[in-house]
Image: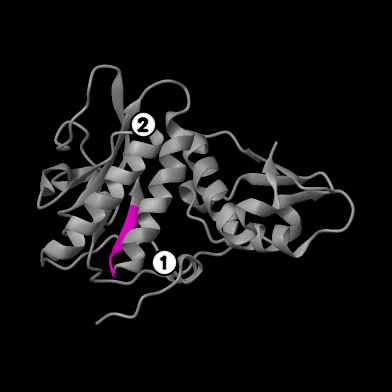
Amino acid sequence: MKKVITLEQAIRQRHSVRSYESKSIDEKISDELNREIEKINSESGLHFQLLLNRPEAFDSFLARYGGFKNVRNYFALVGSDDGTLDEKCGYYGEKLVLSAQRMGLSTCWIGGSFSRKKAAYEAEPGEKLCLIISVGYAADEGKAHKSKDFSSVVSAQGDIPDWFRRGVELSLLAPTALNRQKFLFIFDGANTVSVKAGRGPFSGVDLGIVKYHFETGAGKDNFNWA
């Protein structure tokens, strides 16, 4: 039986994986993933879905050019196109990514290296597909990315508390588009934190991901978002 790891351990262990084994995801694990998706959709109003054994979206030049191999399963991040979709998909998508990691699966955020026309997902009127996340058993475990220094992503007043440091530390382990890490955490010296993301096609998604990592490290009870 695989040892259960903590959320922080999952963050530290996870790497983006583009090459997968051909075996199907264990039914008990897929059931658990679907239960997690139900909780996320109920809480957020999103329409996330798990697609199993549907490789069609990766039968394309884009996927091969992106180095993706044997992608048969993925999460479709779908929701109402209301101006908040990207950030919500980043936040709740990363929650799903780390749940999968704790179940022994590997993942990769994918914004463009797949065929949207061939992707299998459902969308209600007013909804759209934000992006997808591949999921499965890794054939290649991937590798850690380089991270910026703490000081380069922080603007702070007064003494910096340990909880803030922990939050930023885990945020620097977050996946971001092209590993740009274009974000800045601003601390007011009390217990209010804000974060800004740089401009880019997936900057809103990046913002949601780093917010989830920060909350995990800092603890929600220790601060308020500005």
- Residue 62 percent location from the top left of the image: 25, 44
Q: Main secondary structure of the magenta part?
A: strand
Q: Quadrant of residue 167?
A: bottom right
Q: Which quarter shows the N terminus?
A: bottom left
* Colour setup of the view: one colour
Please state the extent of the stretch shown in magenta in the rendering.
104-108
- Residue 154 percent location from the top left of the image: 74, 51
Residue, disc 2? 45
- Tell me which residue sits at (13%, 46%) in the image: 59
Image mark count: 2
Residue, disc 1? 14
Image position of 181 (left or right of 2): right
Neighbours of disc 1 within 10 Å: few (<14), some (14-19), many (20+) = many
Residue 199 seen from this side = yes
- Residue 161 percent location from the top left of the image: 79, 61
Amino acid type at image mark 1: Arg
Neighbours of disc 2 within 10 Å: few (<14), some (14-19), many (20+) = few
- Tell me which residue sits at (51%, 67%) in the image: 8
**Foreground: disc 2 or disc 1:** 2
**Depth check: 111 or 225 in front?**
225
Image position of 119 (left or right of 65): left
